[in-house]
Image: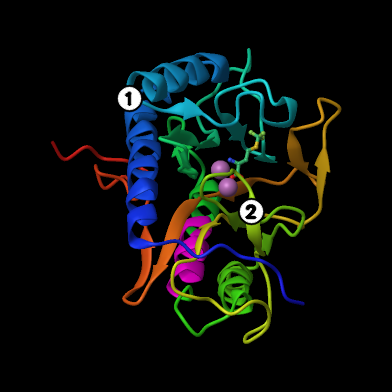
C-alpha cells in the first residue's frame, strides 16, 4: 500500500538537529538524579524545568490527554508510565522518554537507566534493547525497506531469546509528534515502504524478557508486559541522508547505554 510520507530538506534537518540535541541533553542532565529513593514525579518536574529553561516545550503534556512532561517506565512497564508518587528502588531498570518541541520541531528520544545495581539478567536485557535499536538504525539506508529495519530489530532480540513488542512501534516525526511511516519492531527483509532520502522517523524497540504481549492499565496509558516480565527500550530520532542515517538524538556526553560514566 502506498502511504504519504514527508521528505525533509537540509534546512528542515537543521530544525530536527536542534530539537534532537535538546532531547539528548535533557536525558544527559537527568542521569545523576536517577537514584534509589527518587520518585518518578520528581524526575518529571526536573525534566520539564530543564526542557523549558532550554527553549523546549514538552510534547507529551496534554498530548491526547497525557498529563506529564515525560514517560517514565520501570521494570515490567513497557512504555507510557505516568510519573507520580512511584519510588525507584535499588535494582530497578527504568526508561525515560521525552520529546521537547524546539521551534516547532519534535525531538523524540528515550534511554534506559540503572537505579543502583540491577541484576545480571536486567543488564543483559537493557544491552539487548540498545543493540536492537542500533541494528535497526544501521538498516535505515536509502534503498532498504522498513521491513529491513524491523527484521534487524527482531533478529537481535530473538538471538538472545527475548521478544519484541508488537503493540507499539516507532513513527515518522517532524513538526508533529506521530506521523507516517510506522516503524515496526519486526518484519521481513525487503518488505514495507522503501527508505528514501529526507525521511525522518524514530527507531524505538521495546524488548521483553518474556513474551511479547502487553496490557494497558486502567489509567489508559501505562503499558505493561502481560506476563509481568522485564521490558527495556531505547529510542533515537533519525534522518535519512545520502551518507546513511543521521542520529539527531545522540548523547553529547556519550551516554549511549548504562552505566553512564561521566568522563569530565
Ligand atoms: N514519546 C513516546 C514515543 O516515543 C510517545 C509518548 S505519548 C504520551 O512515541 F502521550 F504517552 F506521552
Ligand atoms: Co517515539
Ligand atoms: Co518517545
Q: Position of residue 20 (x, y in %)?
A: 38, 45
How crowded pointer 1 is (Cα within 10 Å; few <14, some 14-19, many 20+) is rated as few
Beta carbon of the mark 1 residue lies under 8 A of ligand 3:
no
How many numbered circles does the render carry?
2
Label drawn at residue 179: 2
Disc 1 element: loop
Q: Is residue 127 left or right of residue 187?
A: left
* Mark nearer the N terminus (1 vs 2): 1
Quadrant where the image shows the N terminus: bottom right
Q: Quadrant of ligand 3?
A: top right
Is the CB–ligand 2 distance for label 2 below 8 Å?
no
Q: Is residue 226 above or below residue 125?
A: above
Q: Going by the image, does 180 lie left or right of 13? A: right
* Residue shown at 47% from the left, 26% from the top: 57
Residue 65, compared with residue 85, is above or below; it is below
Please, which colouring scheme is shown?
A: rainbow
Distance, label 1 to label 2, CA atoms, is 25 Å
Residue 236 versus residue 7: which sits nearer the camera?
7
Residue at 65% over, 45% down? 230
| Snapshot quadrant of residue 77 | top right
The residue lying at 55 percent from left, 71 percent from top is: 156
Instruction: Give me the disc on residue 54.
Output: 1
Let me know if residue 70 is in the magenta part: no
Is residue 37 in sight in this rendering? no
**Where residue 152 sits in the image (x, y, percent)?**
56, 75
Q: Which region is colored magenta?
A: 128-138
Q: Horizontal and vertical percent for residue 264?
A: 13, 36
Query: Could you tell whether 101 is left or right of 149 in the image?
Result: left
Amino acid at each position: 500500500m502506498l502511504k504519504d510520507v514527508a521528505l525533509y530538506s537540509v534546512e528542515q534537518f537543521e530544525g530536527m538537529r536542534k530539537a534532537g540535541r535538546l532531547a539528548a541533553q535533557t536525558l544527559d542532565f537527568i542521569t545523576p538524579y536517577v537514584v534509589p529513593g527518587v520518585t518518578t514525579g520528581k524526575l518529571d518536574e526536573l525534566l520539564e524545568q530543564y526542557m523549558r529553561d532550554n527553549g523546549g516545550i514538552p510534547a507529551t503534556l496534554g498530548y491526547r490527554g497525557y498529563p506529564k512532561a515525560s514517560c517514565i517506565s520501570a521494570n515490567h512497564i513497557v512504555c507510557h508510565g505516568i510519573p507520580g508518587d512511584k519510588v525507584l528502588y535499588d535494582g530497578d531498570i527504568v526508561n525515560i522518554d521525552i520529546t521537547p518541541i524546539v521551534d516547532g520541531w519534535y525531538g523524540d528520544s528515550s534511554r534506559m537507566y540503572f537505579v543502583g545495581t540491577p541484576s545480571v539478567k536486567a543488564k543483559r536485557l537493557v544491552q539487548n534493547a540498545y543493540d536492537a535499536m542500533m541494528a535497526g538504525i544501521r538498516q535505515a539506508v536509502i534503498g532498504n525497506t522498513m521491513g529491513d529495519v524491523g527484521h534487524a530489530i527482531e533478529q537481535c532480540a530473538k538471538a538472545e531469546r527475548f521478544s519484541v513488542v508488537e503493540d507499539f512501534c516507532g513513527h515518522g516525526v517532524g513538526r508533529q509528534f506521530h506521523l507516517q511511516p510506522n516503524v515496526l519492531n519486526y518484519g521481513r527483509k525487503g518488505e514495507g515502504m522503501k527508505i528514501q532520502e529526507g525521511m525522518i522517523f524514530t527507531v524505538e524497540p521495546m524488548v521483553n524478557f518474556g513474551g511479547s504481549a502487553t496490557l494497558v492499565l486502567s489509567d489508559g496509558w501505562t503499558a505493561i508486559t502481560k506476563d509481568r516480565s522485564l521490558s527495556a527500550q531505547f529510542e533515537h530520532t533519525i534522518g535519512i541522508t545520502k551518507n546513511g542515517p543521521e542520529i539527531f538524538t545522540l548523547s553529547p556526553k556519550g551516554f549511549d547505554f548504562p552505566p553512564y560514566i561521566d568522563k569530565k
